[in-house]
Image (cartoon, rainbow, N blue to C red):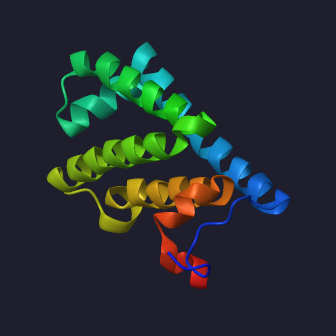
Amino acid sequence: MTAATAPQAVATKGQLRAGWIVSSLIAAFMLFDAIGKLLKPKAVVDAFAQTGWPIETSIPIGIILLLCTVAFVIPRTSILGAVLLTAYLGGAVATNMRIQNPLFSHTLFPVYFGILIWIGVWLREPLSRSVFPLVNRL
């Protein structure tokens, strides 16, 4: 690895601040979603019925999302959390495709969140920049 492609040892204050802002917004949304799956209000029950998922899967899915989000927020496990959340969001894309939801507004919505997850990690965790070395050259 050359000096030009090596990850930065320390993120700047601006990068850290921006990374935590993006990550906090994503984490808040994911926590809201996880809590909804655990409490099962009418909107969640209706969404599960629409997607064809049995409502009994709501609590395990909510717990999985909660654990992935916690891993994402903890600095030592943030990259693992980002990978797990990306996988979770892949399931959401597959579900939306299966029920033929509109592409840009519904099916790709989880992809937009996945991109924001990785932007947040990239900004706040310099080690993650080695995963995306081409971004360093921009």
Q: Residue furthest right?
A: 13
Q: Quick one: 36 or 8, which is closer to the camera?
A: 8
Q: Residue at x 58, y 71 (%)?
A: 6
Residue 15 location, x and y as percent?
Answer: 75, 61
Q: Nearer the viewer, residue 46 or 15?
A: 15
* Count of labels in the image: 0
- Percent coordinates x, y for residue 48 in the rendering: 27, 30
Quadrant for residue 38, please give it: top left
Say if residue 110 shows up in the picture.
yes
Q: Note whether 126 is above or below 67 in the view shown.
A: below
Q: Give the x, y percent position of residue 74.
A: 60, 33
Q: Is 91 situated above or below 33? A: below
The x, y position of residue 89, in whole percent, is 35, 47
Outermost residue, front direction?
2
Q: Is residue 137 above or below residue 118?
A: below
Taking depth in this image into account, of 47 and 92 the one nearest to the observer is 92
- Residue at horizontal 24 percent and vertical 21 percent from the top: 57
- Where is the C terminus found, in terms of image quarters? bottom right
Which residue corresponds to the image point at 55% horizontal and 64% vertical from the top-left? Answer: 129
Going by the picture, which residue comes out furthest to the bottom?
138
